[in-house]
């Protein structure tokens, strides 16, 4: 369209220049005079007038043809301008529609950005919760439900915790506060032993020497290797022990046996005695003792004689009832 307008302008400019080139002066040019002056009265013509008349007829024809061509060109330009106007209107409408769509997309993007920000926030909160729930060391064995919660436990249930020299069984309800009475409930304790300690010692002959340790000839059982045939028991673990002794006195004398204990700070002391009259009487004693690791136990014959043979009348039994569990 722009090119057509330029062509029209150039054509009109060329026409004006050509017309000026053919006129001697604007005042004697027949075309100029014809269009810009009233008709003249008839005058006598000569050869020169005939020439001017012929030139005037020529210029009118040229002007007519040029104006017709330019009129067609201008009409074409007008049509193209109208078409271009319609195209511009349609393009403007499309641009408006596009602008509306872009604004809608911008709003959707804003919502998406906000959604992503919410997701990021949620993820960060989950990471913080996971970090808070992560296992944490307290530097020792747990002693309570509070310790278990600090270590990372969040689901309630039954747990083992360190008690006072025992492994306690407790129920923890982590939905309650620490100061709530239902936060911890003691169920009991576990019979935990790091080393089993059981022994059964027997004699197969009589013991006649007063004020001496009662030795044994046979160890039926000695789990933990705490008992020796010499008659000395050494506690391998701290805890609560049970001991029992039974024997048979000689037929012509009484018999008195004493159970003794030795600790790190106190020498041999009496725990209890067993006494049997003459005429082959059975005598016995039992004891529960709290022993520390390394404490010793023995039997001393204080009076009379102990009768025995292959029937094994004399029996000394002991075992660890409950071990002290310490960190």
Image (cartoon, rainbow, N blue to C red):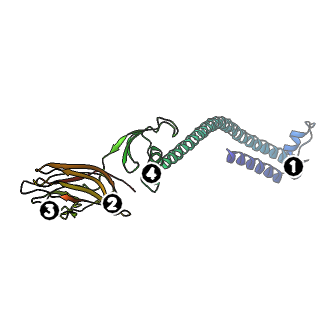
Query: Is residue 46 shown above or below 297?
Result: above
Q: Dot 4, how many residues are within 10 Å of its Cα: few (below 14), some (14-19), or many (20+)?
A: some
Q: Which residue is mark 3?
A: 208
Which of the marked residues, 1 or 2, is nearer the chain's N terminus?
1
In x, y percent, where is residue 98?
61, 38
Q: Quadrant of the C terminus?
A: bottom left
Q: For the residues carrying marks 2 and 3, which lies nearer the camera in this image? A: 3
Q: Which residue is mark 4?
A: 135
Q: Which residue is mark 1?
A: 48
Q: Which residue is mark 2?
A: 293
Task: Confirm or deny contact between disc 4 and disc 2 (CB under 8 A).
Answer: no
Q: Dot 2, how many residues are within 10 Å of its Cα: few (below 14), some (14-19), or many (20+)?
A: some
Q: For the residues carrying marks 3 and 4, which lies nearer the camera in this image? A: 3
- What is the distance, in whole Å, between disc 2 and disc 3 at their CAs? 32 Å
Confirm whether residue 244 shows in the render. Answer: no
Task: Confirm or deny contact between disc 1 and disc 2 (CB under 8 A).
Answer: no
Q: Residue 232's image quarter?
A: bottom left
Task: Confirm or deny contact between disc 4 and disc 1 (CB under 8 A).
Answer: no
Which of the marked residues, 4 or 2, is nearer the chain's N terminus?
4
């Amino acid at each position: 369209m722009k090119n057509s307008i330029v062509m029209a302008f150039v054509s009109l400019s060329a026409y004006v220049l050509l017309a000026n080139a053919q006129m001697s002066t604007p005042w004697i040019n027949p075309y100029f005079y014809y269009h810009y002056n009233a008709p003249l009265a008839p005058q006598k013509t000569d050869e020169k007038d005939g020439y001017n008349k012929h030139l005037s007829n020529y210029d009118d024809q040229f002007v007519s043809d040029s104006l017709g061509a330019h009129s067609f060109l201008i009409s074409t330009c007008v049509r193209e301008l109208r078409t271009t106007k319609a195209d511009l209107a349609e393009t403007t409408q499309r641009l408006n529609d596009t602008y509306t769509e872009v604004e809608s997309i911008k709003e959707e993007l804003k919502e998406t950005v906000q959604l992503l920000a919410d997701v990021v926030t949620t993820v960060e909160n989950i990471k913080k919760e996971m970090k808070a729930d992560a296992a944490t060391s307290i530097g020792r064995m747990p002693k309570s439900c509070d310790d278990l919660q600090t270590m990372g436990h969040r689901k309630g249930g039954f747990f083992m915790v360190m008690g006072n020299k025992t492994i306690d069984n407790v129920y923890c309800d982590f939905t309650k506060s620490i100061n709530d009475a239902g936060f911890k409930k003691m169920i009991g304790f576990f019979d935990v032993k790091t080393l089993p300690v059981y022994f059964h010692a027997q004699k197969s002959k009589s013991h006649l020497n007063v004020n001496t340790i009662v030795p044994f000839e046979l160890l039926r059982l000695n789990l933990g290797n705490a008992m020796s045939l010499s008659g000395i028991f050494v506690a391998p673990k701290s805890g609560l022990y049970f001991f029992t002794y039974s024997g048979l006195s000689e037929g012509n004398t009484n018999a008195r046996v004493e159970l003794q204990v030795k600790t790190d700070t106190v020498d041999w002391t009496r725990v209890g005695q067993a006494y049997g009259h003459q005429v082959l009487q059975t005598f016995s004693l039992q004891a529960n003792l709290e022993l520390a690791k390394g404490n010793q136990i023995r039997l001393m014959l204080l009076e009379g004689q102990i009768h025995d043979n292959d029937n094994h009348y004399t029996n000394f039994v002991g075992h660890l009832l409950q071990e002290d569990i310490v960190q």
